[in-house]
Amino acid sequence: MSLTTYLSSQGFRIEENTVYACNGVGLKHMLRAGKQWLEAHVNVVNGLNVFPVPDGDTGTNMYLTIRSALDAADLSADSSAGAVAASAAHGALLGARGNSGVILSQFFQGMANGLHNKPHFTTEDLAHATGLGMSSAYQSVLEPVEGTILTVARAMAEAARQSAEASRDLISQLANMVDAARVAQASTPDLLPVLKEAGVTDSGGQGLLFMLEGWLRFVRNESVEQEAAAKNAPALKSLLGVAGEEFGYDVQYLINGNGLDVAGIRSAVGRLGWSTVVVGDSRTVKVHVHVTDPGVPISYGAELGVLSDVVVENLTEQARTFVAQRAAAVAPETATVAVVPGNGLGDVFTSLGVTQIVPGGQSMNPSTRELLDVIDSIGSEHVLILPNNGNIILTAQQVQKLSDKNVQVVPTRTVPQGVAALLAFNAATEPAQNVQRMTAAAQDVVTLEITRAVRNTTVNGLPVEAGALIGLVDGKLVSAGQTAASVVLDALSGLAADDFEIVTLYYGEGASAQEAAGVAGQISARFPHLETEIHSGGQPHYPYIISVE
């Protein structure tokens, strides 16, 4: 079967041996191919973190957003290009996760505006639509920065325009768009110095490029299911299978044996699920992982040694029970909703009077729909959202626009900022005044996060080796070392310690209460005037999240 014959059966119009136009059926095929090609490379995109931290989630967020767009498009009974594009844009809007997902959803919205009422699209239509998509993406960001997904979107839109002026062939146009996007993606380190120093290109731009490559591969009748997909499949099945309403199972156990390979076990368990923590030695290994099928990690562990202290918890049922209990409670006039990673941190926010907790955080960003559902479950007409993560703020702001309630966002970028903001909340005060008070309180807090580097790199002039502990102060890498105490002390030494009074340690997976007490003791010894507090946070990826006030 020739390529033109194949495409004519897939929703494309062929004129004079040229692929002239595409209807909604063809657009669905392109969207599916883009989703599949990105799915095959999710781990590649996730690995393009500027900081060498183990929580890269740009690829995951973009994949989930595109998957939501495709799911909505597939439900469209209207086969026109305009109707399918509108459905996809709506699906992307509700399914958007993280900043990259929100920007991508706005790109889809702009494209849908450009294809409005179009039964099919030509090169001119696609150029117009991608131009609007690019503009919409730029407008979604308060302060657009070049060297990001926006740069790649602009390059592909410009290539689409130039191609439409020169040719009526959609395949040629898409090929030119891909070429331009590749050049733009490769140039992102030249536009954003932090990328160059870290030795990576922009993750969001790479995700957009993979989606676009999927479109081109489809119209060329090339496979989008290659070896990379097979390598990504186990992790994606576990990681993405719980997107939406499902949270999966929390599995914990000890493996007792001889000659246990901790690094090998960590790698294997990491492919089975998400929120993975594996620590121990050659005789005893502690495993913690979230999965869709708890039997898989348990069977794996049993093959290596004798299991003990096995714990399996249904996170979905816990979440549903919690939501139901909160919904049944008497709704306050102004409700507070906080996105929180870890049960211990959830207890902290609950003790401070938060109305509703949404499980989430780095590498597990809630979608627009999930936040909307939570807000709808609360009887209050006024709702304040505390994202507690810089990658969730755009999603929260999107919820603010979509909800029928008076929703306002307190732009907390970290958990300690969220705690400070909640402490400043006054139920007797108007929502707008509360937002001002809470935002000001959040800005008075310094956040220190400790995690492990996943690769060798240099950031801000600081060389980092894979496996080393690293410290980030308000998102900036400032220290690295082999022990948590040394990294924390180095980071605190860089602050004007005399300006602060209290240091609060929230220890998470990979840390213990005993170790946290030791770190707190060394802080007190180095900085006698600082009061220290310790709480169990239970957060993944970061053994310590520390508030300095």
Image (cartoon, rainbow, N blue to C red):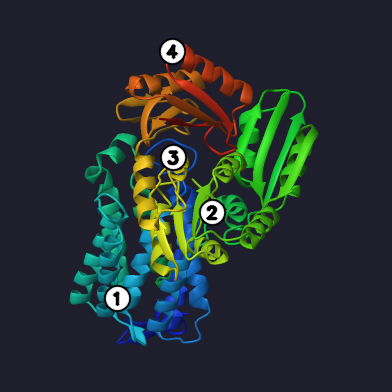
For marks 3 and 1, give the one nearer the viewer: 3
Q: Residue at x 49, y 29 (%)?
A: 504
Q: Earlier in the sequence, mark 2 or mark 1?
A: 1
Q: How far from the left and from the top, in percent, is residue 234?
A: 61, 51
Disc 4/disc 3 C-alpha distance (Å) = 25 Å
Task: Identify the residue under disc 3.
Answer: 420
Q: Nearer the viewer, mark 3 or mark 2?
A: 3
Q: Classify the position of the C terminus by image quarter.
A: top left
Q: Secondary structure at mark 1?
A: helix
Residue lying furthest top: 525
Work out whether mark 4 precedes mark 3 in sequence or the reverse, and give the earlier one: 3
Question: Identity of the amino acid at label 3?
Answer: Ala
In front of the other: 103 or 170: 103
The kind of residue tagged 4 is Arg
Q: Residue at x 46, y 42 (%)?
A: 423
N-term-proximal mark, 4 vs 1:
1
Residue type at mark 2 is: Glu
Label 3's element? helix
- Label 1 amino acid? Leu
Residue under numbered circle 4? 526
